[in-house]
Every structure is written in C-alpha cells, then in structure tokens.
Image (cartoon, helix red, strand yellow):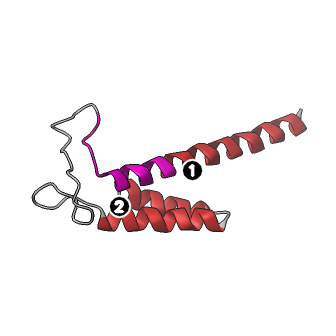
Amino acid sequence: MKAGLAAAAETIRAEATTDEDLDLAALCEYVAEVHRPGDDMLCVSCGERWYAADEFPNLGGIRCQTYIDAVLLKNSWINLAVQAKRAKLDAFQRRAV
C-alpha cells in the first residue's frame, strides 16, 4: 500500500482536470521515489539530512527541502480541490431550494 506522496500522486492523477494536475501527480510520484533517506539519513538524491520522527515527534520528522516543497504543492492542490467541490455543493444546494 502506498502512502505519503506516492498515494497523493495516485489520487491527484485520478481526479486530475488539467495538465497541471497531471504534472503535479508526476512530480509527487518522482519525489516520493527519488528523494528518500539512505542508511545514513541523508537524502539519496540531494544529500540533505533527514531526521526521524522520534527526533522531532511533533513534526513527524524533517525531510529534505525538495520533499517538503512537493508536500506543500500537494497540500495546495488538495485545498483548491476541496474549495471547488464545496462551491459545486453550495451551487447545487441553492438550486434545490
């Protein structure tokens, strides 16, 4: 079972409505595959240090900057998708009244 950015990539791809959405899905999938910690807790792609969740439990660990940037883009996409669905629901509810 996929988790994190890999799972987000599948969700974004399934709900994509634009080429930009598909690009974001590809980016999330790429970052999830390539930017990960090695045995020495350094990112195998960019070399930045990763910190385990037990070192920063309230943050769930700290990842490399590329991974963090991809997560922020993913979160922004989710926010916009929720707003769009909410707007559709509000419009539907107004028509039903």
Gap between marks 1 and 2, in whole Å?
19 Å
Task: Pick whichever, 54 or 88, lies toward us.
Answer: 54
Q: Which label lies toward us, 1 or 2?
A: 1
Depicted 18 relative to depicted 4: above or below: below
Residue stretch rendered in magenta on the structure: 59-73
- The earlier-in-sequence mark between 1 and 2 is 2
Please state the horizontal and vertical placement of residue 63, each as a whole percent of the image.
Answer: 28, 49
CA neighbours of label 1 inside 10 A, class few (<14), some (14 to 19), many (20+)? some
Q: Name, please, the residue furthest toward the front.
A: 47
Quarter of the image with the N terminus in it: bottom left
Residue 64, magenta (yes or no): yes
Outermost residue toward the left? 40
For mark 2, what is the residue? 2
Residue lying at 21% horizontally and 35% vertically, measured from the top left:
56
The residue to which callout 1 is attached is 77
Left or right side of 92 for 54: left
What x and y, as percent, mark residue 17? 67, 63
Position of residue 85 relative to residue 19, above or below, is: above
Magenta span main SS: helix
From the viewer's perspective, is 72 left or right of 95?
A: left
> Which residue is at 54% across, 60% downward?
12
Q: Could you tell me the amino acid type at mark 1?
A: Trp
Question: In which quarter of the view is residue 21 placed?
Answer: bottom right
Circle 2: element type: loop
> Picture coordinates of residue 50 (x, y %)?
21, 50
